[in-house]
Image (cartoon, rainbow, N blue to C red):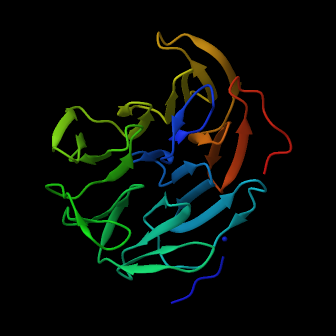
């Protein structure tokens, strides 16, 4: 099957990593999901997936079927297509992997509806006891899932937050759940709430902010990036100075 084309190494002073920086809503009013990495941004909304790579951030949105989740792995943008029982790349040389009914993707693994998991080479890895609603690779390189509304570390099955939350937020040391989209860096946390994109310190003091519509936020290279409904991308410096032109 051929499809048409559509962390911790980030800020030198903010992050040191190589895993994608990702924020995924598991139970919010929107079905927008996105993953951010050094390579760019990949997202899905209403079953349609798009990828926008650096430096042009031109969106490529191939027709691959109904997509439920997306993520980056080894520089490639992958989409989960459960009706076809596959995951597939969205651009570059086409790659597909028959995996069955997928429910969530991390940068490390493909999570199926029965809780079993595979690598992007099709090899079995640690599973979870149930159907995860979202998955993410944390700043520590480990995988975390939302399972029954709880944040669970996959490697040992430990429940880290019994209350859970709608958003998985990557931190330099792992993952936490938040009530709004956010990404945490060593220089502060960036979040989208109350019609604004804000940078806050560890005490929650707002250091900078700009008006911004609802969406998701992450890190791409040295930039803070957001994606909102309809695939609108915006790009900012670490101090939230908007970079123009935006993609």
Q: Count the marks: how many? A: 0
Q: How far across and how far down the image is residue 119, in percent?
A: 33, 66
Judge whether residue 26 can be spotted in this image.
no
* 179 or 9: nearer the viewer: 9
Nearest to the observer: residue 76 or residue 2: 76
Residue 20 place in picture, x, y as percent: 50, 48
Give the answer, above or below, for where 90 lies relative to 161. below
Foreground residue among 38 and 12: 12
* Residue reaching furthest to the bottom: 1
Taking the spot 72% from the left edge, 54% from the top edge, the residue there is 54
Q: Residue at x 51, y 33 (%)?
A: 183
For residue 231, what is the image quadrant?
Answer: bottom right
Residue 19 located left or right of residue 200: left
Left or right, 17 with respect to 134, comes to right
The residue drawn where x is 67% and y is 34% is 212
Specify whether residue 187 is in view.
yes
Which quadrant of the figure has residue 75?
bottom right
Q: Position of residue 48 (x, y in %)?
A: 55, 68
Q: Compared with residue 58, is residue 183 higher up or lower down, i.e. above or below?
A: above
Which one is in front, 13 or 72? 13
Q: Residue at x 38, y 47 (%)?
A: 137
> On the rendered structure, is 96 left or right of 218?
left
55 lies above or below 138: below
Instruction: Locate residue 50, reporting x and y percent.
Output: 61, 64
């Amino acid at each position: 099957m051929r499809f048409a084309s559509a962390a911790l190494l980030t800020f030198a002073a903010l992050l040191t990593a190589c895993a994608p920086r990702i924020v995924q809503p598991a139970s919010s009013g929107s079905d927008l999901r996105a993953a951010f990495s050094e390579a760019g941004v990949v997202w899905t909304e209403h079953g349609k997936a798009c990828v926008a790579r650096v430096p042009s951030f031109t969106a490529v949105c191939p027709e691959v079927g109904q997509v439920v989740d997306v993520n980056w792995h080894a520089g490639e943008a992958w989409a989960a297509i459960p009706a076809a029982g596959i995951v597939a790349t969205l651009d570059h040389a086409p790659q597909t992997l028959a995996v069955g009914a997928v429910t969530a993707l991390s940068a490390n693994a493909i999570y199926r509806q029965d809780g079993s998991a595979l690598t992007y080479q099709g090899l079995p890895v640690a599973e979870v006891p149930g159907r995860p609603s979202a998955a993410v690779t944390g700043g520590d390189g480990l995988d975390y899932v939302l399972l029954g509304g709880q944040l669970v570390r996959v490697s040992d099955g430990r429940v880290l937050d019994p209350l859970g939350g709608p958003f998985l937020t990557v931190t330099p040391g792992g993952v936490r759940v938040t009530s709004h989209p956010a990404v945490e860096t060593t220089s502060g946390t960036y979040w989208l709430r109350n019609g604004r994109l804000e940078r806050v310190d560890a005490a929650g003091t707002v250091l900078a902010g700009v008006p911004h519509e609802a969406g998701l936020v992450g890190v791409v290279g040295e930039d803070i990036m957001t994606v909102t409904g309809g695939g609108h991308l915006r790009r900012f410096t670490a101090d939230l100075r908007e970079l123009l032109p935006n993609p």
